[in-house]
Amino acid sequence: MAGLIGKKIGMTSIFSAEGKNVPCTVIEAGPCVVTQVKTVDKDGYEALQLGFVDKKEKRSNKAQVGHFKKAGTLPKHKVAEFSKTNGDYQLGDEINVELFNDDTWVDVTGVSKGKGFQGVVKRHGFAGVNDATHGQHNRMRAPGSLGASSYPSRVFKGMRMAGRTGGDQVKVLSLRVMKIIPESNLILVKGSVPGPKGGYLIIEK
Amino acid sequence: MDLMKVVADSYNVETKHPEFGAGDTITVHYKIKEGNKERIQQFRGIVIQVKGTGLTKTFTMRKMSSNVGVERILPISSPFIDKIEVNKYGRVRRARIYYLRELTGKKARIKERRR
């Protein structure tokens, strides 16, 4: 799948041709530089490695500087690999938003916002106890029973409990591209995408 | 550079309609679809608030229709708005003139602002 690395800018809404108000996410996508071309001969599979957002040479180690020097660019903050696409890309080529066009569907991957240590209601969508009365006390958001008693005498592995929530890699499938603004490298995608504003995203066609 | 503004500018939200604010009297020419036919309805009233920025900007207008107050909230970038006319610029001292809801008759008048 062909794709680009992008940055989430924010959300807004636009009116579609039918006059419907459509919620959209604005993503700054690319321009990305081809930093490595992987081939079957050399790496065992075909892929493209792209880099996005320049980083100071001072802030990179020598291995990174050397790697990006091969492509003739500055070191990059974010690097991602995309499986080989049709189209012949050379080391150092620039890919921009014109890869997409209006009316394509894309998958967007990002890291969701971290929520910290959360209970079972927020983390797994448990209903909690819906009554504050009828003998309940301090149990409105409690998980309830963890299992049976003397058999099995233990809690099964994988039982959904409270814990660290968010901050996971999340991929949202089939989002429609509503608009492209090539002059500012922006795309508008229908719906929401994971992560905070300014978070890195991988957009695949 | 504010990239959200770039998106809003690409839809010409700021230049499509004349500028107006709370206290102004405006007429909105609103497209209404009835089956296959499309006609234009005019709604004239006082703007009581303008809310939001860019593409998600909305405004609320109020009018008295045979002694019943009618309020409409419209997104300024709605494609159903054919045209907005500013009839009168009013002088008000706040951005959201909700107090107008409690006033009727002569009390509900707004002084005209000289431009």
Image (spheres, coloured by chain):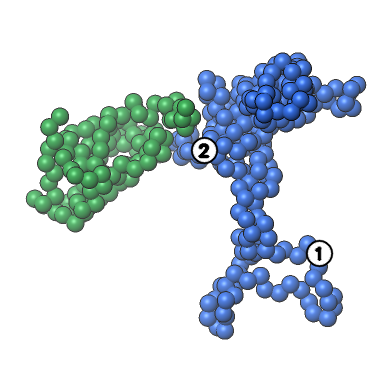
Chain colours: A blue, B green
- Residue projecting furthest to the left: B106
Q: Which residue is mark 1?
A: A157
- Measuring 53% from the left and 35% from the top, which residue is drawn there? A9
Dots 1 and 2 on the same chain: yes
What is the three-letter code of the residue carrying label 2?
Gly
Q: Earlier in the sequence, mark 1 or mark 2?
A: 2
Q: Nearer the viewer, residue A147 or A16?
A: A147
- Residue A32 drawn at (x, y percent): 66, 23
Q: Which quadrant holds the N terminus of chain A? A: top right
Residue A151, image quadrant: bottom right
Q: Nearer the viewer, residue A35 or B12?
A: A35
Determine whether A31 is above or below A139 in the image.
above
Q: How many numbered marks does the figure carry? A: 2
Give the crowd class for mark 2: few <14, some 14-19, many >=20 residues within 10 Å: some
Determine whether A201 is above or below A138 in the image.
above
Give the crowd class for mark 1: few <14, some 14-19, many >=20 residues within 10 Å: few
Q: Marks 1 and 2, Cα distance to the nearest angstrom?
A: 39 Å
> Is residue A7 toward the left or the right of residue B53 in the image?
right
Determine whether A174 is above or below A94 in the image.
below
- Residue A89 drawn at (x, y percent): 75, 17
Q: Circle 2 — which element? A: strand
- Measuring 53% from the left and 81% from the top, which residue is drawn there? A133
What is the three-letter code of the residue carrying label 1?
Lys
Which labelled disc corresponds to residue A10?
2
- Residue A140 drawn at (x, y percent): 57, 72
- Residue projecting furthest to the front: A58
Q: Does the image show residue A187?
A: yes
- Residue B107 drawn at (x, y percent): 11, 52
